[in-house]
Amino acid sequence: MSKEPLMKLVNITKRFGHVVALRKVNFEVYPGECVGLVGDNGAGKSTLAKIMVGYYKPDEGEIYFEGRKVSFNSPMDARKLGIEIVYQELALIDTMSIYRNFFLGREIVKKLGPIKILDIGTMKRISERYLKDIGIRVRSTDELVGILSGGERQSIAIARAVHFGAKLLILDEPTTALSFKEAKRVLAYINELKKKNIAIVMISHNIYHVYEVADRFTILDRGVKIAELHKKDVSPQDIIDIIVRGRK
């Protein structure tokens, strides 16, 4: 593991009117590491994630990426650096094919004389190869995403982020509503991504799932970081107990 964090957040504070969603939160994640970002509802997990990807700007605090201080004006700024997020809702369109979803908004084009057209063959080949790499075999990438299982849809969204050069991947509840077998497959894929030196932040209410892949845990409670724990030092029940007790 690298000695320097890939992303480092220092004293991050975010307010929404009179509500303080985050108060002087420090957070860091290293290449090849998975950090479990956990806490009860309203803890500030999603707000912190949205700051990491440029959806929100912090009211106070500093953000560093690859050792350089950065400021994001939009999610596109973060994406250009290799920061991707896969939301719980999944930005996939059921009525579109697998390969079109894989390249949604980033379509490959080729020139046909003076005209640019979609390079459908290349997009199909790339999406099929990446899906095979994560253990998903489909009859055709022309199939509609709407017929796929939850685990297959989740894996497509993650594989898409990886293909487009994610250095930091933030996963928002990636195993919610998945079957036991599907969840195990997604968790196994996350462990494979760590071997590729990709940094991962996993937000989850399922402590047992996040415990399988995380190296460290950051626990938030009502916008305040209340614990920073290494996996070797705690059990899943220890983490649950800290969340339940919350801030004194």
Image: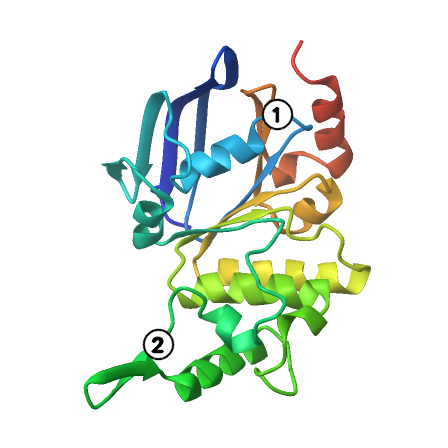
Q: Which residue lies furthest to the left in this view?
A: 114
Residue at 73%, 59% (x, y): give it. 183
Residue at 30%, 38% (x, y): give it. 73
- Residue 108 - label: 2
Q: Mark 1 points at which residue?
A: 43
Q: How much space separates mark 2 and mark 1, taking CA atoms?
A: 40 Å
In the picture, measured across the screen, residue 237 lies left or right of residue 229, that is right
| Marks 2 and 1 close (CB-CB < 8 Å) | no
In the picture, measured across the screen, residue 122 lies left or right of residue 243, that is left
Q: Can residue 192 be seen in this view?
A: no
The C terminus, quarter of image: top right
Amino acid type of the residue tagged 2 in the rendering? Ile
Which residue is at the front of the view, 62 or 150? 150
Q: Quadrant of residue 7?
A: top left
In the picture, measured across the screen, residue 1 lies left or right of residue 68, that is right
In the picture, measured across the screen, residue 176 lies left or right of residue 53, that is right
How are the residues colored?
rainbow
Find residue 148 and report its horizontal and vertical position in percent: 70, 71
Find residue 196 and report its horizontal and vertical position in percent: 45, 63
Find residue 227 and report its horizontal and vertical position in percent: 58, 24
Which residue is at the front of the view, 123 or 235? 123
Q: Which of marks 2 and 1 is nearer the N terminus?
A: 1
Q: Can residue 116 be seen in this view?
A: yes
